[in-house]
Amino acid sequence: MDAAAKAAALAYPVYRNLSAEKRARFLDAIADEIDALGEDFVATVCRETALPTGRMQGERGRGWLGDVCQQGLVI
């Protein structure tokens, strides 16, 4: 967890200077990777968070962050 937090802190200065279009592409790529993990991803998240399977499947399918960035909205 500490390593992930440190990596995020180092990445943020670069990320905050990206255009909305580049942020959208980045978030879409993350969504694609999550989708590619399939039901194994859902099962792992459900085990780790105690969320029901249906809820996690819905959350995984949202994929709206890239769309928001493409519209130029700040998140």
Image (cartoon, helix red, strand yellow):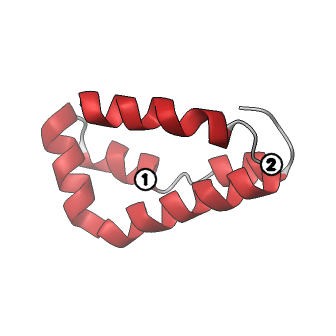
Nearest the viewer among 40 and 15 is: 15
Q: Secondary structure at mark 1?
A: helix
Q: Earlier in the sequence, mark 1 or mark 2?
A: 2
Q: Residue at x 63, y 33 (%)?
A: 13
Of all residues, the one furthest to the bottom in this rendering is 36
Nearest the viewer among 61 and 25 is: 25
Q: Residue at x 32, y 49 (%)?
A: 54
Q: Which residue is mark 1?
A: 60
Q: Do the CB atoms of the residues marked 1 and 2 lie less than 8 Å apart?
A: no
Q: Secondary structure at mark 2?
A: helix
Q: Residue at x 48, y 29 (%)?
A: 9
Residue 20 - label: 2
Expressed as whole percent of the image width and height from the top left, the position of residue 31 reads 50, 59
Expressed as whole percent of the image width and height from the top left, the position of residue 30 reads 50, 58
Mark 2 residue type: Ala
Residue 41 - label: none
Nearest the viewer among 10 and 75 is: 10
The quarter of the image holding the C terminus is top right
**Is residue 25 depicted above or below 4 in this figure?**
below
Of all residues, the one furthest to the right in this rendering is 72
